[in-house]
Image (cartoon, rainbow, N blue to C red):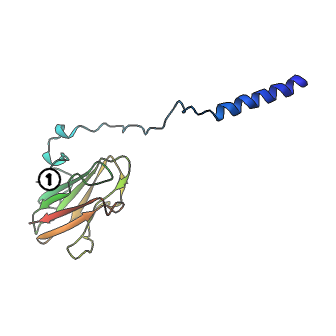
Amino acid sequence: MRYAGLAAALLSVVALAACSSGAAPGWTYQAAPPATPRPPASASPSASAAPSAASSVSPSGSGGPVASGATVTIVATNATKYDTPQVETAAGKPFTIVFDNEDATAPHNVVLLKPDGSAVAMGGDTNFFIGPGKRNYSVPALAAGAYPFHCAVHPIAMTGTLTVK
């Protein structure tokens, strides 16, 4: 009986010492990689997918359903800014915004505003989402002008301008 009490006390001391050691755990959490690896931007057949492109307008048919005329691609690879903060399209023609969210750490979307500050009504799933993934937004014909856009989750840091000419 005496040995049972001693064994229990010894076991408690060992468990307490293991829990309070200053050693780092032998594991860390890391999110699993996406099931389908994304090709590097240089492998893309369209220059509009490259994050360094200042303007991304491509012909109809290159990015999903296009109302008419053009596809504008907006890219985000992190939570601090859009990689394509300046994009443009033609005035008077409906077009599609393809939002390419490559950031797997935070949700994003694109909110397009009229020059007066009111939102442009866009078709498609405009809710924010964590990447990698793409969403297509159908945009009606717009008059010439500068249309600011931002991320609903990061409206101060993630901003840009769509210039309609």
Residue carrying label 1? 54
Q: With 159 as the anchor, is 52 left or right in this view?
A: left
> What secondary structure is marked by label 1?
loop
Q: Quadrant of residue 118?
A: bottom left
**Residue drawn 18% across the image and 45% down it:** 50
Up/down of 91 relative to 128, above or below: below
**Residue drawn 30% across the image and 47% down it:** 102
**Residue drawn 81% across the image and 25% down it:** 7
Nearer to me, 161 or 7: 7
Density class for disc 1 (Cα within 10 Å; few <14, some 14-19, many ≥20) is: some
Residue furthest to the right in view is 1
Query: How far across and how far down the image is residue 46, in percent?
Result: 14, 45
Q: Quadrant of residue 74?
A: bottom left
Q: Quadrant of the N terminus?
A: top right
Query: How far across and how far down the image is residue 43, in percent?
Result: 18, 37
Up/down of 122 relative to 70, above or below: below
**Residue drawn 30% across the image and 36% down it:** 37
Q: Kindly tell me whether residue 102 is visible in this rendering.
A: yes
Query: How far across and how far down the image is residue 20, in percent?
Result: 64, 35
- Type of amino acid at the residue the image marks with label 1: Ala
Q: With 3 as the anchor, is 88 left or right in this view?
A: left
Q: Kindly tell me whether residue 140 is visible in this rendering.
A: no
Nearer to me, 46 or 82: 82
